[in-house]
Image (spheres, helix red, strand yellow):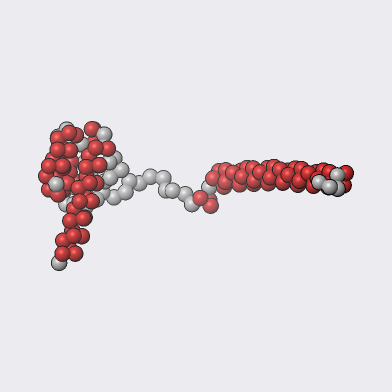
Amino acid sequence: MLFIRGVAGFLLLAVWIYCIVDVVTRDKSEHRGVPKLAWLAIVVLLGPIGSALWLIAGRARTPDQPVPDETGALPPRPAGRAVPNPDDDDEFLRGLRERVREQRRQAAERDRAADDRRAAEERRAAEERDRLAKDQESDPEA
């Protein structure tokens, strides 16, 4: 029983913190009914009740959220241009091929540059070995 109360308390705390952050971060035009500062006071002072009030009555609907009618049913989706299958869109495929070519070209350039750096390092190392070998031949006591 104690575990259930702890979980419930944790969930209420999480919802309360979420609502406080939501009130603070939303633009003042997205608060319904009362000003932003009043909503913040309601949520902070009333705890879970204030959080429920904010979630039910305080948040403005975003434009993409459909509004249910008086029966509670959501309106049908607006008829419009269907989203085409990307495989059927020639312009999309052309752009995709161009991006692939560009990425492959950039990768080849990076590989060539890395190969050039590696070859230069190997040449420097070989020159250094040769120089050390000559130094040892000229001064056998060193």
Number of marks in picture: 0
Residue 128, percent from left and from top: 78, 44
Camera-nearest residue between 107 and 131 = 131
Image height of 7 relative to 129, above or below:
below
* Residue under the image location 24 percent in, 46 percent down: 18
**Residue 53 in sight from this viewpoint:** no
Camera-nearest residue between 125 and 115 = 125
* Residue under the image location 33 percent in, 46 percent down: 78
Image height of 7 relative to 54, above or below:
below
Camera-nearest residue between 72 and 4 = 4
Q: Residue furthest front?
A: 141
* Residue under the image location 23 percent in, 51 percent down: 14
139 on left or right of 25: right
* Residue under the image location 16 percent in, 61 percent down: 5
Camera-nearest residue between 124 and 5 = 124
Give the position of the N terminus as an image quadrant. Answer: bottom left
Residue 66, percent from left and from top: 26, 46
Residue 63, percent from left and from top: 29, 40
**Residue 99 in sight from this viewpoint:** yes
